[in-house]
Image (spheres, rainbow, N blue to C red):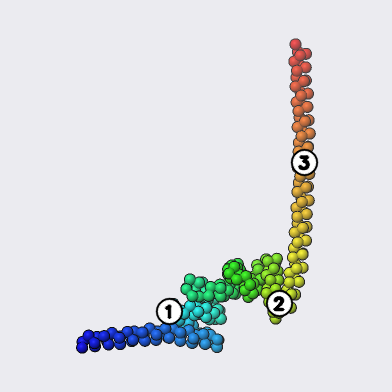
Amino acid sequence: MKKKNLFYALIAGGIFLCAALQSGAQTVMDSLKEGERLFRLDRTDEAIPFLQKASSSGTAPQAFNYLGLCYHKKGELKMALDVFVRAMDVPGTDRRVLAFNAGNVCFDMLDFENAEKWFDSVLAADESYSPAVLNRANCRLNMGKIRESRDDYKKYLELCPEDEQKEEITLLLSVLEEEIVRLELEEMEKLSQEQRLKEEEERLAAKKAEEEALAAEKRRKLLEQMAAAIQEAENNAK
C-alpha cells in the first residue's frame, strides 16, 4: 500500500512539474506577445520591460529584435545597437534582420562606415535583399562614394522597378551621373597637369644636367690649360 501511495505521489509530482514548466513557457510567450503588442501601438516605454523579460529567458529569440527597435524608436541608439549586436550570438535569432537593423542604427548615429559594413554583411548573405541595397546606397552617398552609391541605386531599381520612390531615385541617379562625369573630367585634367609638370621637371632636370656637363667640361679644359702653362713654365726655367 505504501508503494502504491508513493507511486501515485511520484506521478502527481511529475504532473505538477510538467504543469510548472508549461506555465513558465507560457509566461515568456505572454511577455513576448504583450511586448510586441505594445510596440505596435507605439507604447515603447511599456513594451520594454516585457521584451526584456522575454529576451532574458533565452527561449524567445525574436524578443531581441523588438527590444532593439524599441530603443531605436526612443532614440537610445547605443542601447539599440548593443541589443542587436548581442543578439547575433543568440541561437534562433534572425541575423539578417538584426544586421540590417544594426546598420540602420549606425546610419542614424552618422557612423556611415560601420553602417555600410552591416549592410555589406546582410547582402553577403542575400544580395537581393533590396532594403539593404537602398540603405547602403544612402550610406555610400553620405561617404562620398559616388560611383558605388550610383551602382547600388541602379541595383535597387532593378530589384524594385515599381518602387514608389522610383522618380526620386531616377532623378538622383541623373545627378550622380553628371557628378561622375565632372569628377572624371577633373581627374583627367589633374592627370594631364601632372603629366605636364612631370615633363617640365624632366626638361628642367635635363637642362640642368646639360649645363652641369658643360660647366664640368669647361673646368676640365681650364685645368688642362693651367697644367700645360705650369709645365711650360717649368720647362722654360730649365
Residue type at the position of mark 2 = Pro
Whether residue 111 sits left or right of residue 160 in the image: it is left
How far is the residue under mark 1 from the one under mark 2?
Answer: 43 Å
How far is the residue under mark 1 from the one under mark 3?
Answer: 79 Å
Q: Residues within 10 Å of mark 1 (few under 14, many from 20)?
A: some
| Quadrant where the image shows the N terminus | bottom left
How far is the residue under mark 2 from the one under mark 3?
Answer: 60 Å
**Dot 3: what SS?**
helix
Image x and y of residue 12, in percent: 30, 87
Report if the CB atoms under discs 2 and 3 are less than 8 Å apart: no
The residue beneath circle 1 is 57
Residue type at the position of mark 1 = Ser
126 and 111: which is toward the camera: 126
Q: Which mark is residue 204?
A: none
Residue found at x 44% / y 83%: 28
Image x and y of residue 20, in percent: 36, 85
Report if the CB atoms under discs 1 and 2 are less than 8 Å apart: no
Residue type at the position of mark 3 = Ala
> In this rendering, which labeled residue sits more in front, label 2 or label 3?
2
N-terminal of the two: label 2 or label 3? 2
Whether residue 100 sits left or right of residue 173 in the image: it is left
User: Is any atom of residue 105 visible in this view?
Assistant: no
**Dot 2: what SS?**
loop
User: Is any atom of residue 214 visible in this view?
Assistant: yes
Residue found at x 75% / y 57%: 190
Q: Which mark is residue 206?
A: 3
Report if the CB atoms under discs 1 and 3 are less than 8 Å apart: no
Whether residue 206 sits left or right of residue 108 in the image: it is right
The residue beneath circle 2 is 161
Looking at the image, is 6 positioned above or below residue 100? below
> In this rendering, which labeled residue sits more in front, label 1 or label 3?
1
